[in-house]
């Protein structure tokens, strides 16, 4: 459920796609690295990268609770 994750307009999403946060879960770090490389190469815009990560988190919010709290603190 989308209320289980922080709103997409939070600045931390942009920080995530730019590689400013390291994730505890390896599978999540792979997704962050993927969008970061996409943005750097010009294959994705920052907005597309945020959308991608947001939807990924929305699918599996309970599996990434610790990572979400580490980055966003509260929401």
Image: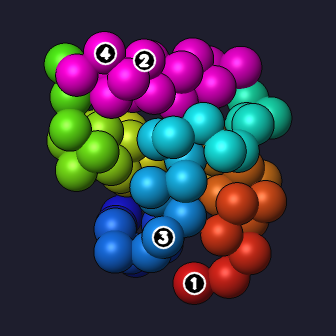
Residue 54 magenta-drawn? no
| Figure quadrant of the N terminus | bottom left
Residue at mark 3 = 11
For disc 1, the marked residue is 75
Q: Residues within 10 Å of mark 3 (few under 14, many from 20)?
A: few
Which SS class for mark 3? Answer: helix
Establish if 57 lies above or below 75. Answer: above
Specify whether 5 is left or right of 29: left
- Residue 25's place in the image compared with 17, above or below, is above
- Magenta extent: 26-42
In the visual, does 22 lie left or right of 9? Answer: right
SS type, badge 1: loop
Q: Position of residue 29 (x, y in %)?
A: 64, 25
Residue sitting nearer the eye, 50 or 39:
39
Q: Which residue is mark 2?
A: 37
Identify the residue under disc 4. 41
Mark toward the start of the polypeptide (1 vs 3): 3
Nearer to me, 72 or 62: 72
Eye-nearest disc, 4 or 3: 4
Task: Using the rendered image of the protein, determine whether residue 61 is visible from the camera's viewpoint.
Answer: no
Q: Which callout, 4 or 1, points at the residue further toward the start of the chain?
A: 4
**Residue 39 visible in this rendered orientation of the protein:** yes
Q: Quadrant of the C terminus?
A: bottom right
Q: Nearer the viewer, mark 1 or mark 3?
A: 3
Mark 1 surroundings within 10 Å by alpha-carbon count, few (fewer than 14), some (14 through 19), many (20 or more)? few
């Amino acid at each position: 459920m989308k209320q289980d994750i922080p709103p997409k307009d939070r600045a931390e999403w942009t920080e995530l796609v730019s590689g400013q946060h390291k994730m505890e879960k390896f599978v999540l770090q792979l997704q962050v690295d993927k969008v970061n490389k996409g943005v750097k190469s010009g294959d994705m815009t920052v907005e597309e990268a945020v959308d991608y990560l947001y939807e990924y988190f929305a699918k599996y919010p309970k599996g990434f609770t610790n990572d979400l709290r580490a980055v966003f603190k509260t929401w």
